[in-house]
């Protein structure tokens, strides 16, 4: 497919038309715009994400599609050129979903130990900042006696309060899930809308902070995406 076509298509449209190969090509176009010494690092992160999430799926698509969209959005729509942030975006679910595999530990390793080891492995492969960025967007082990969605929202608000660059990764993740909620079906659409809808005001406030390292143009784009996500949540839950 022509590069000019991919560069002008919305990310979910690329997904529908061309699937994972199209999203890979779209990210590759962005990678080629980085300095030569950064390109192998970005490709390494992409391939590690593909390896770790090879068997994972999100409703109708490979899970890798989500990770590719999150990274492309940060580069193309947010204007971020920080390689560590893009690497962490590609691997933002690696510690949460595959800590033992990433760290080379046996199945059943205690959660805290596996998490620390997986973060250390990202620090070894890339650098400590990448590991800590991923840690900031990794969900903790939840208290089974409390509502999971409530604990998720508390974690997001607390972790992103202290880490401005983690906000950038998490809002791309959030808007990909929120705007893309219409691609889910049945109970999954309703459960996702119920989980994410209460966080829209939180993200609007976090992105609006002076220390959030994005341009005003990028922030306005994010506000528009949050508004669209809210309309879709409302359509699912209220109408």
Image (cartoon, rainbow, N blue to C red):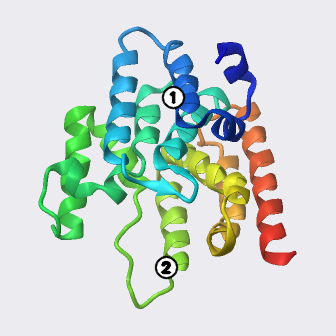
Provide the residue designation for mark 1: 24
Pick the front one: 75 or 107? 107
Residue drawn at the location 56% of the way across and 43% of the way down: 168
- Residue 151 appears anywhere in the view: yes
**Where is residue 117 shown, x and y percent of the image?**
18, 53
Provide the residue designation for mark 2: 148
Residue drawn at the location 13% of the way across and 56% of the way down: 105
**Where is residue 239 shown, x and y percent of the image?**
87, 75
Residues at circles 1 and 2 in contact by the CB criterion of under 8 Å = no
Residue 31 as seen in the image, left or right of residue 15 = left
Name the image quarter holding residue 83.
Answer: top left
Above or below, 219 relative to 209 = above
Residue 147 as seen in the image, left or right of residue 37 = right
Residue 48 as seen in the image, left or right of residue 2 = left
Among numbered discs 1 and 2, the one appearing first in the sequence: 1
**Where is residue 175 shown, x and y percent of the image?**
66, 51
Query: From the image, which quarter does the N terminus lie in?
Result: top right
**Where is residue 225 shown, x and y percent of the image?**
76, 47
């Amino acid at each position: 497919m022509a590069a000019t076509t991919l560069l002008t298509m919305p990310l979910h449209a690329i997904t529908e038309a061309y699937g994972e190969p199209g999203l890979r090509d779209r990210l590759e176009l962005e990678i080629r715009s980085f300095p030569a010494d950064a390109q192998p690092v970005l490709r390494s992160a992409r391939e590690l994400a593909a390896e770790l999430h090879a068997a994972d799926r999100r409703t109708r698509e490979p899970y890798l599609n989500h990770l590719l969209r999150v990274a492309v959005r940060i580069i193309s729509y947010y204007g971020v050129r920080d390689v560590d942030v893009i690497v962490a975006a590609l691997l933002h679910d690696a510690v949460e979903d595959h800590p033992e595999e990433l760290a080379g530990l046996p199945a059943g390793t205690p959660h805290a130990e596996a998490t620390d080891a997986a973060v250390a492995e990202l620090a070894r492969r890339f650098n400590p900042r990448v590991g800590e960025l991923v840690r900031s967007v990794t969900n903790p082990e939840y208290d089974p006696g409390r509502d999971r969605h409530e604990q998720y929202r508390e974690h997001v608000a607390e972790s992103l309060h202290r880490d401005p660059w983690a906000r950038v990764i998490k809002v791309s993740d959030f808007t990909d899930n929120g705007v893309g909620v219409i691609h889910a079906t049945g109970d999954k659409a309703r459960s996702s809308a119920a989980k994410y809808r209460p966080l829209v005001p939180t993200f609007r406030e976090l992105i609006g902070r002076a220390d959030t390292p994005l341009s005003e143009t990028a922030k306005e784009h994010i506000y528009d995406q949050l508004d669209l996500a809210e309309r879709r949540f409302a359509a699912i839950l209220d109408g």
